[in-house]
Amino acid sequence: MREYNFKEIEKKWQEKWEKDNIFKTENNVNGKENYYVLSMLPYPSGKLHVGHARNYTIGDVISRYKKMKGFNVLQPMGWDSFGLPAENAAIQHGTHPAIWTKSNIENMKRQLKLMGFSYDWEREIASYLPEYYKWNQWFFKRMYEKGLVYKKKSLVNWCPDCQTVLANEQVEDGKCWRHSKTDVIQKELEQWFFKITDYADELLEGHEEIKDGWPEKVLTMQKNWIGKSFGTELSFRVLETNEQLPVFTTRVDTIYGASYLVVAPEHPIVEKILAKNPALKEAVQNMKNTDLIERSAEGREKNGIDTGWKVENPISKELIPLWIADYVLMNYGTGAVMGVPAHDERDNAFAKKYNLPIIPVIEAPEGEDPFGYNGKMINSELINGLSPKEAIEKMGNLVEEMGIGKRTTKFRLKDWGISRQRYWGTPIPALHCEKCGTVLEKDENLPVLLPNDIEFTGNGNPLETSEKFKNATCPCCGGPAKRDTDTMDTFVDSSWYFLRYCDPKNTEQA
Ligand SMILES: [Zn+2]
Ligand SMILES: [Zn+2]
């Protein structure tokens, strides 16, 4: 038996494939059905790893099989080549991100070719190239015109020493990756958002189309991520200020069991509380500085601050204490929730920790836990004896009749914050003019190019160091304007790359 001489045999055939250009794919071939095999485009980290080899072999096997079956197969490859590692390398070793990225791409491409994958390299794309990111800017403009892009204030991880925003990956145990003794804080910054919540219902409806074929588990994850919940929004009166504090709940049936009300540390009422009681400032600040993902993590111990204030339950008229707690998030619901410790596990743990009253209002059937929808209402004057579901219905009507709230739908899905205060991404094509306000660059001036006169010191946003970039001309009045120095999240790049492969060289046609 002869040994398989892979060095000789693979080289011979790979050279022949390349010479004959057999993997080039025409858009249409007479008599052949088109078949598109798409694998994820890799981040050019430098070297292929075994995970790449595994992943891309699967795609290649399908590709070759379909080709042999007579299909016109498109199997393209490209590079998801903006992002943090290139910028970190620039900070640490002084190499420009473009040089680092280009040489990584060259090496990984060489390795992919050694594997003999049947890619149509004429369709290769790389998101860091202006001919690609021009279209990110073009999409941004079209979405802005339709009201699907907007600006709002939002929290970011901030290192006071770097004077810069940190990605979650740059925060290690609450400290900066470059300053192991510096606490990372949460800072509010104006940021750009894509209004993906407009599509929440459409996304859910789309599950119907893919339910045959997609794993149940994946669809459930998607549903939970969109997190549509029906509930009631109703207001509690704050005794100290006499204002109404709206609360969202999916369990208005348990309103008689509310023994405290709790707001997020970012809730606007907290400022008023602190004005009256400055001693709470430090504790509130500590809460705000905790990363939001950590704060909402399941099983984490909940922390609270008793404000000393009282609110009035709009149904029972009972006065209950107002707390601030880290497990309440400002960006879900109204940022305020009623605590019903007898019928909610999270509230239960919180009430036990702080000795708050636990008032049962549902009598669950023998052997069942009291956190579900079975049983009947007790200790609830207007709805005693009803099932929880009936009680939700009746209480919803009542709240609307009394004019203290309404039935409403909330989503867990949030708008997508795409602003990054970094260099290595697509520049946001916006400018700030003193006369005209925020304006977008003209289509004919796209792409807004990344400048090269940049210093990578690790302090601040590198784009701020380029005078050439910052100082621009207003596309509306022709006066001086400052260019927006935010760049786009790299997931914008990878949101549409599969379309670009179909027409990879097009520079103009929109
Ligand atoms: Zn730092
Ligand atoms: Zn202007």
Image (cartoon, rainbow, N blue to C red):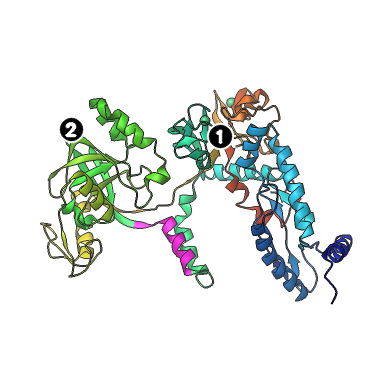
- Residue 236, position as x, y percentages in the image: 21, 43
| Residue at the spot of label 1 | 421
- Residue 500, position as x, y percentages in the image: 69, 53
Is 98 drawn above or below residue 297 in the view shown? above
Mark 1 neighbour class, 10 Å CA radius: few under 14, some 14 to 19, many 20 or more: many
Point out the stretch of residues depicted in magenta: 216-229
Judge from the rendering whether residue 267 lies leftward or rightward of residue 45; answer left or right.
left
Q: Kindly identify the residue that appears in the image at 27 percent across and 47 percent down.
A: 337
Amino acid, disc 1: Gln
Residue 95 seen in the current view: yes
What secondary structure is found at the residue carrying circle 2? loop
Is 408 drawn above or below residue 137 in the view shown? below
Residue 428, by quadrant, is top right
| Residue at the spot of label 2 | 240
Mark 1 or 2 closer to N-term?
A: 2
Any magenta on residue 218? yes
Judge from the rendering whether residue 169 lies leftward or rightward of residue 444; answer left or right.
left
- Our reading of the magenta stretch's main secondary structure is helix
What secondary structure is found at the residue carrying circle 1? loop
Any magenta on residue 411? no
Judge from the rendering whether residue 12 lies leftward or rightward of residue 200; answer left or right.
right
- Spatial separation of the CA atoms under disc 1 and disc 2: 41 Å
Where residue 205 is drawn, which disc sits there? Answer: none
Q: Kindly identify the residue that appears in the image at 51 percent across and 33 percent down.
A: 165
Residue 65, by quadrant, is bottom right
